[in-house]
Image (cartoon, rainbow, N blue to C red):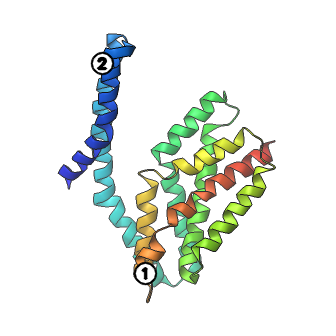
Amino acid sequence: MRKKLTVEVLKAILPLVIAIIIMQFAFIKMPLGLFLQFLAGAVMAIAGMILFLLGIETGILLMGEAIGAELPKRRSLSLIVGIAFLIGFAATIAEPDVIVLTGQIDMVSQGTISGSFLVYVIGIGIAFFVAMAMLRIVFNFRMAYLLAASYFIILVLSFFTPPEFVPVAFDAGGVTTGPMTVPIIMALGIGFSSVLAGRSAISDGFGLIGLASVGPIITVMLMGIILH
């Protein structure tokens, strides 16, 4: 598994590194110190991604499935919703992509849109829709209906949201599909649906990310409306 992860990470990062090296010698001609700093950062990024993904697969992914499989046995709807909300929120505020996006927004807006506050707003959006996804599995709602209703709400909110918050909202929905959030939410859904009689882990366990990513769009839009 370690060898496979290493190969996958190298395939993902090396093309970018090679392209920048080629541009460095052909066009850009960056200062030597900055170029060496880039190479050192690339090596650290590769090592970090390998360790990160290894940790996800060997521990967090398995724990997510175990928690999802255990929840139906408790026969408590409020517990299912509460645990799903908590896991969705915790996974989001730990998501590297979310941290990078909110930091960039804070810097560009010069503190007008607080990065730390935005992280929690995004986390609440994801958490709410992860809980909704669990309820969908329990009551067997069609995913199409929930998605249609969610995007209708987004369409309506877009007419009232300040223009500077609209792109932020959609970017917030995009960055939540990162390497931390996706495995945990998918594992939770697959584990949850796999122990329900007559249910398919494929049809119920997948699609959760698409539904959950709607949450940050709505909550960031609401934040923009409230703040302005």
**Place of residue 108 in the rendered image (x, y in percent of width and height, measured from the top left):** 63, 28
Is residue 194 something one can see in this rendering?
Answer: yes
| Kind of element beneath mark 2 | helix
Element under disc 1: loop
Count neighbours of disc 1 (C-alpha within 10 A) and say few if under 14, some if 14 to 19, many if 20 or more: some
**In what quadrant of the picture does the N terminus appear?**
bottom left
Q: Amino acid at mark 2?
A: Leu
Q: Is residue 126 above or below residue 40?
A: below
Callouts 2 and 1 close, C-beta under 8 Å: no
Horizontally, residue 177 falls left or right of residue 81, namely left
Residue drawn at (37%, 72%), measured in percent from left and top? Answer: 66
Q: Residue 71 in the image: state x and y as whole percent.
A: 46, 77
The residue under label 2 is: 36
Is residue 10 toward the left or the right of residue 209 in the image? left
Q: Which residue does the image show at 58% across and 51% down from the upper left?
A: 173
What is the spatial separation of the Cα atoms under label 2 and label 1, in whole angstroms?
Answer: 51 Å
Front tag of 2 and 1: 1
Seen from the viewer's position, the closer of residues 152 and 101 is: 152
Q: Amino acid at mark 1?
A: Ser
| Residue 200: numbered disc | 1
Q: How many marks?
A: 2
Across and down, in percent, residue 84 comes to 53, 67
Q: Is residue 33 above or below residue 143?
A: above
Above or below: residue 115 compared with residue 71: above
* Residue located farthest toward the front when viewing the structure as drawn: 26
Query: Residue 194, image x and y in percent?
Result: 40, 79
